[in-house]
Image (tube, rainbow, N blue to C red):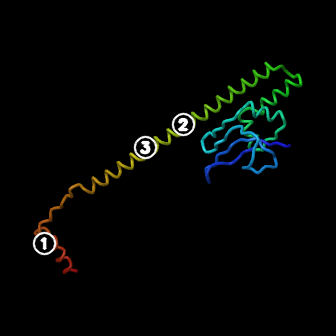
Amino acid sequence: MATKIRLQRFGKKGKPFYHVVVADSRAPRDGKFIERLGSYNPNTNPATIELDFDSALNWLIQGAQPTDTAKAILSYKGVLYKKHLLGGVTKGAFDEATADARFNEWLEKKGGLIESKKESLSKLQAESKQAAFEAEAKKKADIAAAIAAKNAPKVVEEPIAEEAVEESAAPAADEAEEK
């Protein structure tokens, strides 16, 4: 029986959630499976992956073929690298202690990369919240200034004395008659 490591889709429309399973290659995508290895949630940033490492490694050693997406998930978690190192041990390229040391070094490096990504994402989110807060504060200040200007008592201009208007109108009338 040909087995595949693949994803079973769950979740609602637009919000997928997957189970990583080992299934017969002839079974439908969301149908019968042999064993559930873990889960994959692409809705979070970075994606949340839970995987039974030893079971996945065991299935790979037995010959289960991962699909493209499952292969990417197994690679991300280091299952494929561990299988590669175990292949080197069986060929006699190096001993098991060296393989474990290399794998642990890789895990530490990978963990550091993931943590730095999480920190940069949280920092970026905090900066965007701060920028939005400042923009909102400026907008509120502009609105308050506009309301204050609208509600301020209007300065009433005093009417110019009628005598002054008549005096200024009279020379203009004299000039018009001369022309």
Image coords of residue 119 (percent x, y): 57, 33
Residue at the (13%, 67%) spot, across then down: 164
- Circles 1 and 2: CB atoms closer than 8 Å: no
Residue picked out by circle 3: 133
Q: Quadrant of the C terminus?
A: bottom left
Q: Label 1 amino acid? A: Glu
> Callout 3: helix, strand or loop?
helix
In the rendered image, the residue lying farthest to the left is: 163
Residue picked out by circle 2: 122
Residue picked out by circle 1: 166
Q: Label 3 amino acid? A: Phe
Looking at the rendered image, the disc whose residue lies closer to the viewer, 3 or 2, is 2
Looking at the rendered image, the disc whose residue lies closer to the viewer, 1 or 2, is 2
Looking at marks 1 and 2 on the same chain, the residue that comes earlier in the sequence is marked by 2
> Callout 1: helix, strand or loop?
helix
Residue at the (76%, 23%) spot, across then down: 102
Residue at the (85%, 28%) spot, across then down: 87
The circle drawn on residue 17 is none
Looking at marks 3 and 2 on the same chain, the residue that comes earlier in the sequence is marked by 2
Nearer to me, 14 or 168: 14
The reply, left or right, for residue 118 in relation to residue 102 is left
The quadrant where residue 113 appears: top right
In the rendered image, the residue lying farthest to the right is: 91
Image coords of residue 152 (percent x, y): 23, 54
Image coords of residue 19 (percent x, y): 69, 43
